[in-house]
Image (spheres, helix red, strand yellow):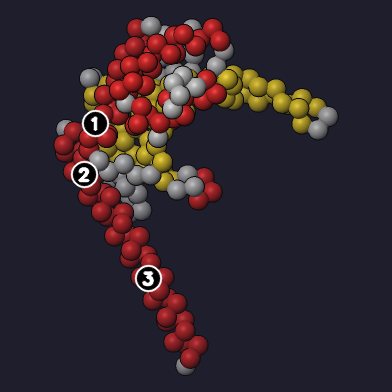
Amino acid sequence: MDRLLGLVSIAGFFLFLLTIVLCSYQLRRRKYRQIANELGAEYQSQGLFKSGKIAGFNNQRKYTVENEEGARGSGSFTVIKMQCMNKGIPLHIHGWFFKNFPNWKYAFTEGDRTERVFVTNVTVQNAGIPLAEKYRIEVQGLFQEFALLNSELLRKGQIRIEQDSMSFTVHGVLRKLEVIRETLSILSTIAERIESAPIV
């Protein structure tokens, strides 16, 4: 009898935890529906245990806002992704780049990197490599305005500019409409500049 009561107690505890997690996701889903409505965008459900996705247009550019779970229990991330046709180099700008702008230790591009492993050399393709000196003036010019006006927001995340899209990733779940709206505005402006003057 005691064993049965113990099993019921454990099952009840796990059911209670599951209910809390479900309620948390339902509140996030509701908030994302509200944000989507405010932005004039579409809310797309992604199942019971996800916040869902916001999909819309900003200055005729497709964008999405969604949450992702990090690897190995590193928490949740919000990824705001926007359409951008980049004919130049890929760029990865980490938030600390804006702390003592420009902090070149946090600006990368992609390429092949050779690393020594035991007695052989291994080439890693599409790895992050430090940004070459020849690109620095253009990259600094691209982000100068945002470093002065929006450094607090940009310090908290990472900007990735790929071939056909760009994104801003920040730790945690973004729930503030104004922060999302400001991020979309920044991404849209950067996309316009990258498309008109690619960094090559």
Measuring from the top left, give residue 135's x and y in whole percent.
50, 10
Question: Residue 162, can we see it?
Answer: no
Q: Nearer the viewer, mark 1 or mark 3?
A: 1
Which amino acid type is marked by label 2? Arg
Q: Which residue does the image show at 52% across and 20% down from the upper left?
A: 104
- Label 2 residue SS: helix
CA–CA distance in space, label 1 to label 2: 15 Å
- Tag 3: Cα neighbours inside 10 Å, few (<14), some, or many (≥20)? few
Q: How many marks?
A: 3
Q: Residue at x 47, y 93 (%)?
A: 1
Label number found at residue 15: 3
Q: Determine contact: label 1, label 3, CB under 8 Å.
A: no
Q: CA distance from mark 1 to mark 3?
A: 37 Å
In this rendering, the answer to whether 30 lies above or below 58 is: below
- Residue 173 vs 8, above or below: the answer is above
> Which residue in the protein does label 1 denote?
181
